[in-house]
Amino acid sequence: MTSGRAALTALHLLLVWAMTAAMMPVLGFGIVASAWGGGTGATVPVFLLGVPLTVGLLAVAGLPARTVVPLCDSASRRLGWAVLVFVLGTAGVAAGLAAYAADVDLGGAGTRIALTGVPYAVAAAFFVPSRGVRLAALAVLAAGVAYGGFVGPAQARQRQYDAEVARYRENPELLYLGATPPGMQLSRAEVGPASFTVEYGPARAGYELGYVGLVVLSPSTTEPLRCPEPVEQDATCTVDGHGELARVRDLPGDTHDITLVRRHRDAEVQVSSQFLDEPGLRRLLDTLHPLSDGELAKLIEEKKIDYRL
């Protein structure tokens, strides 16, 4: 391709890009605004006016390329070329909108407007009888597909995951887990504004019984733990020399509801169960450790953790 033809081709593609980057956002906004104000029927006049106008302007943008693009050498063929470029470019814009709706980062408003014209310029480039131009257009198309279909969605998922982790980590001083009791598994966890709740259930859910609850709270006072007064009927409450509170309530069927409470660093931790005995609950308290990134990632992956306002 000679320098003169290269300059005409560049001008041609630049005009296609500039015209569509200016027109398509206006047309899209007009369709959305009319639909918002008057329903689907109100978009028909905007569509019937905007699309022919855009195709006509595309045909005008093809004028400088009369000598380099065979489809632009006459008015009728140029109009057909404009329709083809409009259809192919609009398909590209639709793919971009789908990617944007899937939270793919396409930059700020100015960048997104500029990108609107790219699919039309790429479509126009495929009609230029030059191997270099078509290979460049193919490279741009491949880059767009790779970013919109793979790289961008992966980045969006990572941003969503990072935001989710940051929300769970708002109060790290409350995020503690203990060693899972034998024969049990962590069934769910819930993060609140000032609490972290963990529920352990039987490993063979539906076949065995068992429940252990772990609650980590921001203490309302720095005073040592004390038993409530008066102690409820059929219950005992003691505080040992280490400041750990033990409350046992008798239940029908020779079972007991056991609750242990202790201070752990800047938090107050409570474990309770009707199935696990005091040594088992105390072992759970003795094995408290900060929730690791791996443990949090597993809870998120298994959808076992929620956030409560």
Image (cartoon, rainbow, N blue to C red):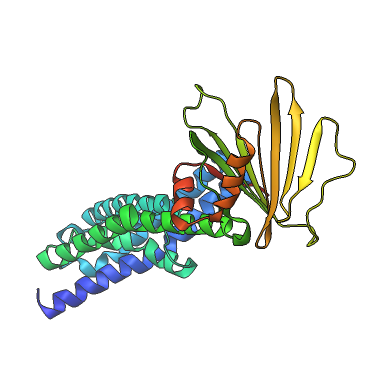
* Residue 218 can be seen, yes or no: yes
Residue at image point 60% right, 49% down: 285
Among all residues in the image, which is located at the extreme right? 230
In the image: residue 296, left or right of residue 256: left
Residue at image point 58% right, 51% down: 286
Q: As displayed, is residue 10 above or below residue 254?
A: below
In the image: residue 77, left or right of residue 215: left
Q: As displayed, is residue 248 above or below residue 147?
A: above
Residue 84 position within the rendered picture, expressed as x and y whole percent measured from the top left:
27, 51
Residue 217 position within the rendered picture, expressed as x and y whole percent measured from the top left:
69, 53
In the image: residue 60, left or right of residue 210: left
Q: As displayed, is residue 98 above or below residue 69?
A: above
Quarter of the picture holding the N terminus? bottom left
Among all residues in the image, which is located at the extreme bottom? 3
Residue 227 position within the rendered picture, expressed as x and y whole percent measured from the top left:
82, 47
Residue at image point 54% right, 56% down: 289
Q: Nearer the viewer, residue 64 or 261?
A: 261
Residue 158 position within the rendered picture, expressed as x and y whole percent measured from the top left:
42, 57
**Residue 73 quadrant:** bottom left
Q: Nearer the viewer, residue 173 or 289?
A: 289
Residue at image point 59% right, 61% down: 172
Q: Nearer the viewer, residue 44 or 172?
A: 172
**Residue 78 quadrant:** bottom left
Q: Nearer the viewer, residue 109 or 147?
A: 147
Among all residues in the image, which is located at the extreme front? 241
How many marks the image carries: the answer is 0
* Residue 101 can be seen, yes or no: no
